[in-house]
């Protein structure tokens, strides 16, 4: 029984030394700036003991240095759950680091909340006070910029609306002008057609009048020819009569 107990204690000691060794070696690589190697060692430590507060906390810091903010946030939250009373003094640092992680992701509201929690744990933490002030100032600037962007967007939308109305008006005016031009062209064509018809009618009337005059002139010419022929005939008869009368003795008046 004692032998079995001794074996269990020895195995537990070897296991603990292995986790501690991995964490210590990971911390050495972290200090050297070899964050990828440190990440590997901290993960190996967690494979042996997933409830290791130090392994989660150090892995979170390693992720943060590599700008893996989503992974870092996840590990910080696990470390916060595992902190307990034993690592109560670390809570301030964890909240502070969570705040920094949110700040890097530009999640200002969450960053501000984390810095406030950090100061609740350690009101004298000057870094947390400075970062809280910075986050609040940045939030104010962001709100101001958002308000400006909103106004600019509103102005842009209004400008686009005005341009659309203007374009629609121009389009309608163009369409109206096109229709007016078409109507004017149709009107002009109708006028031209009417004028052509009038001219044609005038030409036909003139032709009819000319034909009538020509016909009348032909009739007058024939009448004149008949009259002339009749006059000539009458003249012949008169001359013949006169010739007959010329052959008779002339009767003289008696002289009393």
Image (cartoon, helix red, strand yellow):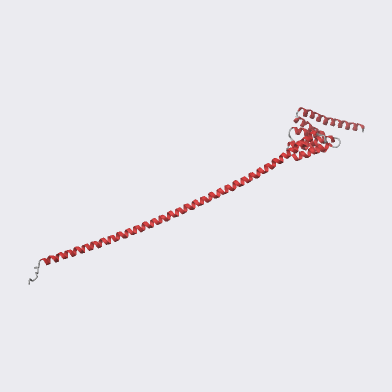
Q: Using the image as rendered, state which of residue 56 and residue 233 is in the foreground.
A: 233
245 up-or-down from 204: above or below: below
Image position, residue 243 (x, y; %):
12, 65
Q: Residue furthest bottom?
A: 256
Q: Quadrant of residue 103?
A: top right
Identified at 84% across, 34% down, the residue is 89
Image position, residue 57 (x, y; %):
80, 34
Q: In this orientation, does residue 72 appear?
A: no
Please state, as top left, top right, bottom left or bottom right, where the N terminus lies in the image.
top right
Q: Using the image as rendered, state which of residue 117 and residue 88 is in the foreground.
A: 117
Q: Is residue 191 left or right of residue 45?
A: left
Q: Quadrant of residue 233?
A: bottom left
168 up-or-down from 246: above or below: above
Q: Quadrant of residue 85?
A: top right
Q: Residue furthest right?
A: 2
237 up-or-down from 181: above or below: below
Image position, residue 46 (x, y; %):
80, 34
Q: In this orientation, does residue 31 appear?
A: yes
Q: Using the image as rendered, state which of residue 157 and residue 44 is in the foreground.
A: 157
Q: Residue furthest left?
A: 256
Please state, as top left, top right, bottom left or bottom right, where the C terminus lies in the image.
bottom left
Q: Residue furthest front?
A: 256
Identified at 18% across, 65% down, the residue is 234
């Amino acid at each position: 029984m004692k032998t079995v107990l001794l074996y269990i204690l020895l195995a537990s000691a070897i296991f603990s030394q292995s986790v501690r060794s991995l964490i210590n070696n990971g911390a050495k690589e972290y200090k050297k700036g070899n964050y990828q190697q440190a990440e590997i060692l901290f993960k190996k430590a967690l494979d042996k003991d997933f409830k290791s507060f130090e392994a989660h906390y150090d892995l979170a810091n390693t992720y943060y240095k590599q700008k893996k903010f989503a992974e870092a946030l996840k590990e910080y939250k696990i470390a916060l759950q595992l902190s307990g009373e034993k690592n109560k003094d670390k809570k301030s640092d964890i909240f502070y680091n969570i705040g920094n992680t949110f700040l890097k992701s530009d999640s200002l509201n969450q960053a501000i909340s984390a810095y406030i929690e950090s100061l609740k744990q350690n009101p004298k933490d000057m870094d947390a006070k400075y970062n809280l002030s910075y986050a609040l100032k940045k939030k104010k600037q962001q709100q101001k910029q958002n308000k400006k962007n909103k106004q600019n967007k509103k102005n842009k939308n209004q400008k686009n609306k005005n341009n659309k109305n203007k374009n629609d008006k121009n389009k309608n005016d163009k369409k109206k002008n096109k229709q007016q031009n078409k109507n004017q062209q149709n009107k002009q064509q109708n006028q031209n057609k009417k004028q052509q018809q009038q001219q044609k009618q005038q030409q036909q009337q003139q032709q009819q009048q000319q034909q009538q005059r020509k016909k009348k002139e032909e009739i007058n010419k024939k009448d004149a020819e008949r009259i002339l022929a009749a006059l000539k005939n009458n003249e012949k008869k008169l001359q013949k009569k006169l010739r007959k009368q010329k052959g008779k003795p002339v009767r003289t008046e008696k002289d009393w």
